[in-house]
């Protein structure tokens, strides 16, 4: 039986307590960060796992220079794994053969990611239609078969990109797309804990029908969205590809989180990563006595609030701020 990871609009709008990553305030407690300059600097004696990881050679082919191709899409199940665990990639495409290049996002001398491994898929067959609920607008692709799995043995905690690359020379489109997932490290006591805003990514994700803001069977009457999106869904699922960046780039990883990941890792801070759904499931990692700061992604408005008010906690849900 497929386990559904579903959250409602109420959860999407909930207050998340966290610390915004503002260098002038948050990182002042750490003193001088380890120096990291590409392949030099602190690489001779790495101060922590993140410094050592970023001393490895990066690979700039992780990006989608020609944009995402809807002819090959997929998602990771589960979205977040502990290092050493396996993740399943469920891919929908009309290509029988393609490649999955797995990258870890970081600094890597300015390249921005490192190629961890490549997996070749052959003999792929189309996926079944996703399950749907006409009353709530829920679209759940948990019935898709697993196309390929990867075991993350030895993987450093981080945000990972599985780049899907068609190898059949398609006549149109870029022939590539991305799957995002998080690798945790539940035993390492890092000083910083970076939480991704995946619940926001899913709240704005319209794949298969609608998001919590646009599309679906529920009326948006009385809301600020009524003029642009007359309807919305009441539920959305993690079991589907992301299309958030196509129509709501401000609510996608490359708006705020990726630049902060680069900055934190370029400066050699001791950081590990968790997802928003991990926090929703209990946040067991917050009992780590070695943890100094818990970081959540933020936009410039929240950074200004943090710097001006010097607050320890604030409402850090991008969805909530963008409606103001």
Image (cartoon, rainbow, N blue to C red):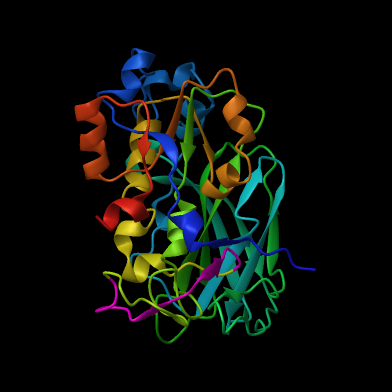
Between 91 and 250, the one nearer to me in the picture: 250
As drawn, the residue found furthest toward the front would be: 222
Q: What percent of the width, then of the height, locates residue 163?
A: 51, 62
In this rendering, position of residue 231 left or right of residue 233? left
Q: Name above or below for residue 147 compared with residue 271.
A: below
Image point (67%, 71%), residue name? 142
Image point (38%, 70%), residue name? 213
Q: Quadrant of residue 33?
A: top left
Image point (53%, 46%), residue name? 275
Q: What percent of the width, then of the height, locates residue 221?
A: 33, 77
On-image quarter of the N terminus: bottom right
What secondary structure is the magenta-colored segment mainly?
loop
Q: What percent of the width, then of the height, locates residue 191?
A: 49, 22
Q: Name above or below for residue 285 compared with residue 171.
A: above
In this rendering, position of residue 175 left or right of residue 151? left
Point out the stretch of residues depicted in magenta: 225-239
- Magenta-drawn stretch contains 205: no
As drawn, the residue found furthest toward the right would be: 1
Q: Quadrant of residue 100?
A: bottom right
Q: Name above or below for residue 277 compared with residue 312.
A: below
* Residue 51 seen in the figure: yes
Between 49 and 316, the one nearer to me in the picture: 316
Between 214 and 260, the one nearer to me in the picture: 214
Between 76 and 163, the one nearer to me in the picture: 76
In this rendering, position of residue 291 left or right of residue 23? right
């Amino acid at each position: 039986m497929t386990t559904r990871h579903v959250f409602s609009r109420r959860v999407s709008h909930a207050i998340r307590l966290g610390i915004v990553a503002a260098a002038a305030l948050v990182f002042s407690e750490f003193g001088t960060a380890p120096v990291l300059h590409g392949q030099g600097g602190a690489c001779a004696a790495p101060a922590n796992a993140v410094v050592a990881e970023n001393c490895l050679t990066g690979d700039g082919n992780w990006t989608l220079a020609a944009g995402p191709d809807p002819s090959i899409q997929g998602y990771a199940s589960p979205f977040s794994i502990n290092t050493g665990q396996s993740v399943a990639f469920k891919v929908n495409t009309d290509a029988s053969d393609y490649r999955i290049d797995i990258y870890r996002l970081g600094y890597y001398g300015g390249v921005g990611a490192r190629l961890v491994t490549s997996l070749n898929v052959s003999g792929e067959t189309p996926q079944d239609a996703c399950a749907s609920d006409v009353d709530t607008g829920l679209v759940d692709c948990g019935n898709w078969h697993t196309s390929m799995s990867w075991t993350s043995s030895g993987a450093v905690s981080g945000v990972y990109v599985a780049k899907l690359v068609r190898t059949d020379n398609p006549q149109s489109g870029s022939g590539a797309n991305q799957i995002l997932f998080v690798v945790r490290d539940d035993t390492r006591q890092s000083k910083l804990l970076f939480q991704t805003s995946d619940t926001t990514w899913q709240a704005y994700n319209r794949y298969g029908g609608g998001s919590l803001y646009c599309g679906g069977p529920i009326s948006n009457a009385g809301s600020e969205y009524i003029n642009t999106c007359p309807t919305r869904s009441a539920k959305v699922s993690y079991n589907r590809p992301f299309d958030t960046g196509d129509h709501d780039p401000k609510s996608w990883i490359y708006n705020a989180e990726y630049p902060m990941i680069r900055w934190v890792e370029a400066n050699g801070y001791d950081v590990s990563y968790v997802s928003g759904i991990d926090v929703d499931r209990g946040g067991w990692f917050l009992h780590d006595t070695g943890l100094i700061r818990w970081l959540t992604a933020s936009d410039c408005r929240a950074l200004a609030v943090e710097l001006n008010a010097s607050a320890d906690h604030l409402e850090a849900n991008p969805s909530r701020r963008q409606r103001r």
